[in-house]
Amino acid sequence: MSATLPPPSTPAAGQHLKERAERVLMPNYGSRDTTLVRGEGCWAWDADGKQYLDFLSGIAVNNLGHCHPAVVEAIRDQAARLIHTSNGVLIEPQIELAELLCRDLGMDKAMFANSGAEVTEGAIKLARLWANEKFGSYKHKIMVFTGSFHGRTYGAMSATWSPKVRAGYEPFVPGFVFAEFNDLADVDAKWNDCVGAVMLETVQGEGGVRPATPEFLKGLRERCTARGAAFICDEV
């Protein structure tokens, strides 16, 4: 693939699009100054023709780059046959992907969702359902960590440490216990019989790209097994 520069849409097209956006879009992502219109491989271009080396990759989504020929061909082929169904029916590609994940990752089942926040909500619900059925409703608390970011829906936000994400949305969903990240001593100090699950990012993103140490992960796994708690990894 060649990184050929496309012509700009119109003079100052980016500023015009930004002004249009400010009139009609909620500012939930803050002010956005760049309007991308095209991508190829690791390159992207904005509405004014400026070229970027795209390190963000759609927040780790475009792992094969923009407009990879094999991905484009697969999307075109699928769109020509069947674009969308509800979860009330089965489709073979979803089954094939679930089989691949279960086989290669050693999982029993796979669940597909629309966003990271939705997956977090599902994990919270599954952990509490499991703990309730196995131990009783008292074991409902989930231990989470300083520096964490799990999403912006209410359950996920309640498990998130970031003050800038939480500010103004109180009261939060109860039942989350915050412990210091990478600190097993604080985990032990904060743990009680009501903790039914532990949830963490193996590498904190919003928290500053901080990895959990192998000793911390191993210690959490051992404690969850010994104390009867689910261990949830929120990771890309």
Image (spheres, rainbow, N blue to C red):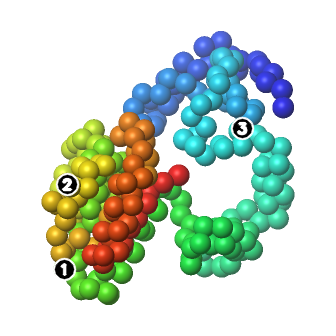
Which is more foreground, mark 1 or mark 2? 2
SS label for mark 2? helix
- Which numbered disc covers residue 186? 2
**Vertical position of residue 151 compared to residue 18: above or below:** below
Residue at image mark 1: 138
Please tell me in which quadrant of the rendered image residue 118 appears.
bottom left
| 77 with respect to 160 (left or right) | right
- Badge 1 amino acid: Tyr
The disc, 2 or 3, on the residue closer to the chain's N-terminal end is 3
Q: Which numbered circle lies on residue 66?
A: 3
How far, Cα to Cα, is label 3 from label 1? 48 Å
Q: State the residue at coordinates (83%, 43%).
A: 69
Residue located at (46% from left, 36% from top): 24
Indicate the quadrant where residue 142 lies: bottom left
Q: Choose mark 2 or mark 3, whichever is in front.
A: 2
Q: Nearer the viewer, residue 183 or 147?
A: 183
Compared with 53, 186 (above or below) is: below
Instruction: Please determine whether, in this image, residue 45 is positioned above or below residue 205.
Output: above
Say whether marks 1 and 2 touch (CB < 8 Å): no
Image location of residue 135, percent across then percent down: 26, 86
Mark 1–mark 2 Cα distance, whole angstroms, equals 22 Å
The quadrant of the picture occupied by the N terminus is top right
Query: As shown in the figure, which amino acid type bears the numbered disc 2?
Result: Asp
- Contact? badges 3 and 1 (CB < 8 Å): no
The amino acid pointed to by label 3 is His
Distance Cα–Cα, label 2 vs label 3: 43 Å
Left or right? Give the position of 41 relative to 110.
Answer: right
How far across and down, in percent of the image, does residue 178 sit?
A: 22, 55
Q: Is residue 72 visible?
A: yes
Binning the other alpha carbons within 10 Å of mark 2 as few (below 14), some (14 to 19) or many (20 upward) gives few
Crowd around label 3: few <14 · some 14–19 · many ≥20 (10 Å): many
Q: Is residue 28 visible?
A: no
